[in-house]
Structure formats: C-alpha cells, structure tokens
Image (spheres, grey):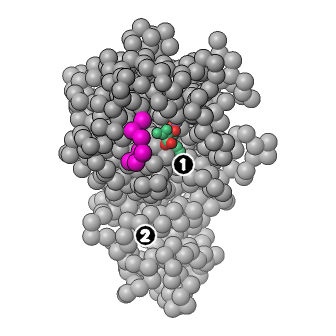
C-alpha cells in the first residue's frame, strides 16, 4: 500500500540539472590570462606582499589598474571581490578580482575564498568563465586540492530547493564552460581533481535534498525508492529492501520497537556497490534513517520539532557518499545499510519500561523512547557482521548532547580502533568536514546498566553522546568500527535553515583512501 499524499509522482526527479551542465565543462587548461577570451576571468589576488605572476601580467596589460586597486584597500578582506567590466587591455568581458589576505591561505581561509569564487563563477548571464588560482600557494596543499575544493564549492552553490514554492526562485544558471588555469603538464591531475570536486558536490547535494524534503514525503518508503532509483544508475550497485515482516523473521526486535507507533512501514535498505574484486572485504556504511523523530511516547517538546525531519541525515549521507563513489568509479566494495523508520506516539507505540530483544540476542530495557536512533542502529550493526567488513562506519544524528559538546563545527567521532579513528579525523581535516574524537571508556559504558535487561537504552545524567556511543559499541565487537554523531553538523537552523550534506565529503575522502 503506497499512499504517499504528495504533489508530484512518488519519485520526485533529482534537482541537480544545473550541476549536470557544470560537470560537463569544468576543465583545466593552459591559457594566457591577458589574451583569454571568456565572459569572465576570475583571479585570486593576494593583497599582501609582492604581486604574483598573474597579477603582474594583468597589471601591466591593464595599465596599472590592479596595483591601483590593491593600493585602495578595497580587496583587503579575505574573499572581497571587485569586478572590472570591459577591462581595457584584456580580451575577457570582465575581470573579477578576489582578494586573498594571505598568499598562503589556511584551509579555512581557502574555503572562504572557494565560496566567493563559486559565487563569481556561477553569476547569472555568464556563458564561459575562467579562473586563475596561480598566485596563491600553500605548503601543505597542492593545486589538485585547491581544484577539488573549488569545483565542489561551485557544485554546492548550484543547489536549490524550491519544489514546494509556487513561485520558483530564479534558477541559478551555471555557465556552460568553466576553465581552471593550469600548466599543461599538470592538466590531467587537475582535471581529475575537478571531477572529484563535482562528484563530491553531487553526493553532498543529494544528501541535502533528502534532508530538506518534508517528512510527509521523505518517508522510509521514499528513501527505499530513492535507493532503488540510484541502483538503476549503475550496474555495479544493487539495492535490496527488507520489509517489516522480513525484519521480524530475522529477529530485529530492537529496530521494530521504534516503528511500533507509526502507520508508515519501516524499511531496511541494503545497497551493495561492487567496485572492487569479488572477495575483497567491503567498507560498510550504516546511516540512521529516522524520517521523523517525535520522540514517541517520550514525546519531544514542540519547539523546533520540525527539525526532526533531519533525523535521517545519516541515511542521506550514506546515499550521498555512494552517489559520489559511483561517479568516481571507486574500485572498492561498499555496502550501505539504512534502517529507515518513523518514531511516533500512539496506542501501539513502545512504552518506557518495555524490554526488547535485539538481533544480536542482547536484551534492551527501553527507558526513553526518544533514544531511538541507537535502537535501530544496533540491529543494523549486527546485520553488518555478515559482510565480514574491513571497517564499519555508522553515521547518525544521535544525540542533542553532541551539539552541546561540539556545537556545529565538528561531528563527534567514536571508535573501537585507533587506526580507523585517525584515518577518519584526517579525512575530515582534509575535506573541510571535521570530526573530533571522544572516549568510549568502560566507566561510561557502566552507565547503561539495567536491573531488568542486558542494558538500558539510556545512560542517565552526563555524557549523553558517549553513553549513546557505548551502547552502539556493545554491538560492534567483531570488526573495526567508528560512529559519527552528526547531530550538530547535518543541518543549519535559523534563517539559513537547510541540510549541509555533512559528512559526505569526509566519507568520500575515506572511501578514496580505502582504495589505495
Ligand atoms: N534525534 C535525536 C537527537 C537530536 C536531538 C539530534 C536534537 C539533533 C538535535 C535523538 O533521537 C534523541 O532524541 N536523543 C535524545 C537521547 C536522550 C533521550 C537520551 C536526546 O539527545 O535528547
Ligand atoms: Mn529521539
Ligand atoms: Zn532521533
């Protein structure tokens, strides 16, 4: 029975047509900025120190205009932009200068520049635009890293979510041709770096779209349909969906306790991407897919409850990461597991005090039905064992306490394996998607003791993110495992409300490195 009361068909088309256009045409090329013919030439100019070769060449071609601008101080803040239309002495239709306070910007300064550059490259009305980054250089980041970050920023800037507005926002048109200046020797490496950035953006934007969709549309069934749609796009990807009945037969009593109160059927989504050799152990990604978390009988307060539509952002990040992996054709086996449920109160709902048996056989006393993420994840984590995985990473908007601990800048990272933890931290650092590790000490685990079952589903006062992670750790003893708590990073609240697509870029970086 599929009665999704939505305005369009049951599967809404993907929104990223504009990204498709950009993807075709973001290429590296050797060109002379002075004679280049393009609608726009965007140049990053350090505002301190001696001008770099590109700034010098342009300055003398335009009769000193750039030195004069630098002197004026108008570019003095990192990312400030200034446009010269029909610049005398150049062939470009306009010259856009993007000021960089440092010739060797830090990662965070560069990400800010990348956002500004993306805005300039996607300005309405441009057919072709070219970018010169040559005058900046960082000791620990090479040109390919810069190229990836810029392409990704361009792709991300094309995201729009207006399908429920009667009056559409102006579609942000992407120029049909984007060029990044490079010397011809580096061209090949830069081109694949640009492709990586665009592939990342595609995965990130998919995760954002799924997150932003309202919970009456983005149901467990809808997520399953989108997973199946994704599997159609590549022969190496297959999607399988287990029904509640099948989950019952398997013994997923913990997962099923969460769906007891809702009319919407739960789905257990299994994606298998076979990019690697037949018998190489897969990386398993497990994403929390609570399409709406009301708290259940332990009902949440009303304020901002709408934001609990984002409680499936872990699931969205798994679909996003796999989308990017397909596009990059990673030679690696990846499994995506998505327990998808809605958490609602009703006469059938699970009560505080109920005891359930998980797929692992361990029993759980449910003291708070709002601690539901761990209840669905534990069964998925036990299911993951059958793949004999090389590593399992689960991603979940798991605890409000994680937002208290780390705010919105870093995801919480927990792991039973130091090497895996270090790898993930470094991937986060390198992909502008940072995580910070917290401990899984036994003292915290003890907080989960129950007088009536093997464990309780909450750990009482203090360290809520850690006790939640300790709960998951009880189900992950048989493989290297890490848990990313993305409660603070998966979406923005307030005027800029919207899904961020995190931690897709961290995950994709990890998958890329897992290939090597
Ligand atoms: N989905 C929430 C966590 C959450 C809350 C994420 C707010 C982002 C913002 C999760 O299911 C939950 O409700 N956790 C409880 C656990 C508690 C009952 C032990 C929480 O964080 O309050
Ligand atoms: Mn909850
Ligand atoms: Zn939740």
Count neighbours of disc 2 (C-alpha within 10 A) and say few if under 14, some if 14 to 19, many if 20 or more.
some
Say the numbered circle drawn on residue 109. Answer: 2
Q: Where's residue 29, x and y in %?
A: 40, 60
* Residue at horizontal 21 percent and vertical 41 percent from the top: 417
Q: Is residue 332 left or right of residue 75?
A: left
Front residue of 197/35: it is: 197
Q: Determine whether the residue tagged by mark 2 lies in a helix, strand or loop.
A: helix
Quarter where residue 430 is shown = bottom left
Quadrant of the image for the N terminus?
A: top right
Quarter where residue 360 is shown = top left
Query: Residue beneath label 1, please?
Result: 491
Task: Write the start and end of the magenta stretch as one range.
Answer: 458-464
In the rendered image, the vertical position of residue 23 relative to residue 363, given as above or below: below
The overriding secondary structure of the stretch rendered in magenta is loop
Q: Is residue 462 magenta?
A: yes
In the rendered image, the vertical position of residue 452 relative to residue 486, given as above or below: above
In the rendered image, the vertical position of residue 108 relative to residue 349, given as above or below: below
Residue 164 makes an appearance in the image: yes
Quadrant of the image for the C terminus?
A: top left
* Residue at horizontal 43 percent and vertical 20 percent from the top: 355
Which numbered disc, 1 or 2, marks the residue that appears first in the sequence?
A: 2
Mark 1 or 2: in front is 1
Q: Where's residue 506, x and y in %?
A: 37, 47
Q: Where's residue 294, x and y in %?
A: 60, 34
Q: Is residue 430 magenta?
A: no
Inter-mark Cα distance, 1 to 2:
22 Å
């Amino acid at each position: 029975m599929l009665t999704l009361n939505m305005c369009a068909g049951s599967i809404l088309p993907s929104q990223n047509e504009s990204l498709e256009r950009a993807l075709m045409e973001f290429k590296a090329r050797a060109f002379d900025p002075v004679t280049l013919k393009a609608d726009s030439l965007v140049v990053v100019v350090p505002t301190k120190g001696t001008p770099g070769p590109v700034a010098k060449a342009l300055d003398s071609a335009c009769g000193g205009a750039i030195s004069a601008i630098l002197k004026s101080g108008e570019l003095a803040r990192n990312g400030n932009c200034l446009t010269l239309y029909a610049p005398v002495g150049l062939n470009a239709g306009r010259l856009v200068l993007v000021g960089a306070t440092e010739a060797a910007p830090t990662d965070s300064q560069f990400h800010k520049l990348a956002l500004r550059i993306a805005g300039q490259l996607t300005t309405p009305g441009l057919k072709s635009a070219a970018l010169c980054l040559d005058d900046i250089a960082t000791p620990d980041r090479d040109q390919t890293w810069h190229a990836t970050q810029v392409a990704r920023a361009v792709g991300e800037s094309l995201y729009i979510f207006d399908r429920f507005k009667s009056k559409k926002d102006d579609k942000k048109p992407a120029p049909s041709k984007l060029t990044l200046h490079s010397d011809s020797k580096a061209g090949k490496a830069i081109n694949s770096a640009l492709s990586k950035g665009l592939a990342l953006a595609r995965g990130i934007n998919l995760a954002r779209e799924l997150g932003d969709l309202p919970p009456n549309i983005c149901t467990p069934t809808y997520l399953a349909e989108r997973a199946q749609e994704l599997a159609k796009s590549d022969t190496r990807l297959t999607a399988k969906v287990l029904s509640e009945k099948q989950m019952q037969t398997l013994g997923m009593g913990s997962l099923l306790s969460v769906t007891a109160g809702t009319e919407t059927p739960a789905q257990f989504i299994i994606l298998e991407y076979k990019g690697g050799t037949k018998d190489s152990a897969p990386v398993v990604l497990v994403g929390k897919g609570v399409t709406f978390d009301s708290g259940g009988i332990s009902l949440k307060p009303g304020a901002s409850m709408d934001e609990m539509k984002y409680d499936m952002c872990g699931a969205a990040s798994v679909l996003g990461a796999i989308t990017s992996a397909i596009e990059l054709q990673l030679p690696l086996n990846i499994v995506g597991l998505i327990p998808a449920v809605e958490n609602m109160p009703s006469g059938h709902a699970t009560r505080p005090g109920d005891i359930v048996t998980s797929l692992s056989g361990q029993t759980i006393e449910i003291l708070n039905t709002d601690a539901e993420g761990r209840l669905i994840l534990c069964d998925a984590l036990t299911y993951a064992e059958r793949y004999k995985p090389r590593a399992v990473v689960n991603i979940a908007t798991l605890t409000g306490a994680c937002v208290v601990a780390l705010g919105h800048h870093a995801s919480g990272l927990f792991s039973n394996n130091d090497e895996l933890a270090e790898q993930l931290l470094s991937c986060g650092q390198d992909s502008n998607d940072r995580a910070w590790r917290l401990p899984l000490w036994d003292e915290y685990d003890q907080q989960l003791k129950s007088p009536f079952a093997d464990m309780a589903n909450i750990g009482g006062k203090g360290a809520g993110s850690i006790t939640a992670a300790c709960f998951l750790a009880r189900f992950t003893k048989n493989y290297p495992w890490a848990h990313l708590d993305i409660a603070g990073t998966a979406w923005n609240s307030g005027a800029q409300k919207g899904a961020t697509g995190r931690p897709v870029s961290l995950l994709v970086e990890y998958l890329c490195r897992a290939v090597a």
